[in-house]
Amino acid sequence: MDRTNLHHVWKAILIGVALVVATACYFVPVLLVAIGLVLLVLLCARVVYPGRDRYIPNLYARDIRVYDDAYRSFIGHTLSDLRACRIRGHTLLSEASLLPGLCPQDSDELLLDLGAWIGWSTRLISDASGRPVYGFDTFSGLVEDWQVDDQAVVQRGTFSLSEPFAQRLIRDTGVTLHDGVPDTLGRKVRFVKGSTYETLAPFLAAHPAAPIRLFHMDLDTYESCLHALETCKDRFIEGSVLVFDEYLVTSGEMLAFYEFQRKYELEWRYRAWGLEIMEMNVEMVTARRKRGVYYLLWIVGYGLIGDGSYVWKFLRRQFWRFWLGAQISDILFLLAVGGQRKSVSIAITGLGTLRPNAEHDQADG
Ligand SMILES: C[S@@+](CC[C@H](N)C(=O)[O-])C[C@H]1O[C@@H](n2cnc3c(N)ncnc32)[C@H](O)[C@@H]1O
């Protein structure tokens, strides 16, 4: 289920490059000296570099001094906790496969996929868990601009199914659309079309008292994320698992969850830090050869224009933050992928003031 062939291709490329460099060093030993010197300079520079722990491993994009002390401390704790629960695969699929099988007493539990795009994240959650899943999307793209830290703004309307990239993946992964909504392709899934600002509350009203077991957040923006958390808040239970696909964007999902857990005094813990689910779309391409081309294009895109470009574009600030400020283990972790590792899962362990009787308790107290 949880295919990581893309990353195997990337590792094969890395090993290939290492072999070429090693061979070159064997025949031209001065190269070895040059590489050694560069590493030595890098190590010395790391000793004096002042930026350690000011940036977060969204490939060292954002200087977190722009935030207040409380949020900075939250980010600091987040990083040390996440380092202890890194996983190799996709966070969402790992969590879905760990859900217990459905038994009659929890048959009303909800698995929500917020941000379904062409529907593969929803279908794959169902495949991995064996349970019904509800996928929400406008299918016409983001409903607001998405500010990605201080790096870029992704325009409202991006990820519309009418975009050429979506159309191509729809065709190559065997998806069909009906009235602009992707088909279930035989899975136990239902897609709910429209903005979550309008669809989520009526959907929950139609499933009264049903608890949310899995909440997958892939709406990308801070506003949509916070709105979904607030709308779903009375359906979270102890044991609900929240997966945030873009968690390491500190101006987006992480900020929304930080505010949410603080407001309701939730108890919770991090469970996993792994790969984003979006790239699984590439794994679903049906023709083998075409899939291979997608892997290569994905890796090249990540390395040239995506966050992977921080690794080698030394004229960018992120290059210096990454090579000088990052923990060595983070550098190795992030170099070992040809794609994004921003996806984080969280388990709710205590409901704080969201407990059904919490208001009475406070009034009594
Ligand atoms: C990154 S894509 C989701 C990718 C998908 N989970 C996957 O792995 O293939 C984000 C999606 O969220 C949808 N979206 C963003 N904000 C939304 C909102 N408020 N209501 C409904 N859909 C929204 C966009 O239309 C887009 O398809």
Image (cartoon, rainbow, N blue to C red):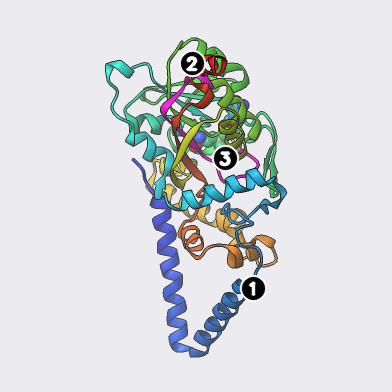
The disc, 3 or 2, on the residue closer to the chain's N-terminal end is 3
User: Of discs 1 and 2, which sits in the foreground?
Assistant: 2
| Label 2 sits on residue | 357
At label 1, the amino acid type is Val
Q: Secondary structure at mark 1?
A: helix
User: Residue 140 versus residue 342: which sits nearer the camera?
Assistant: 342
At label 2, the amino acid type is Asn
What is the span of residues highlighted in magenta in the rendered image? 233-252
Measure the alpha-carbon separation of dots 3 and 2. Answer: 49 Å
| Label 1 sits on residue | 48
* Labels 3 and 1 touching (C-beta < 8 A): no
User: Residue 74 versus residue 201: which sits nearer the camera?
Assistant: 74
In the rendered image, which quarter is residue 103 located in? Answer: top left
221 drawn magenta: no
User: Of discs 3 and 2, which sits in the foreground?
Assistant: 2
234 drawn magenta: yes
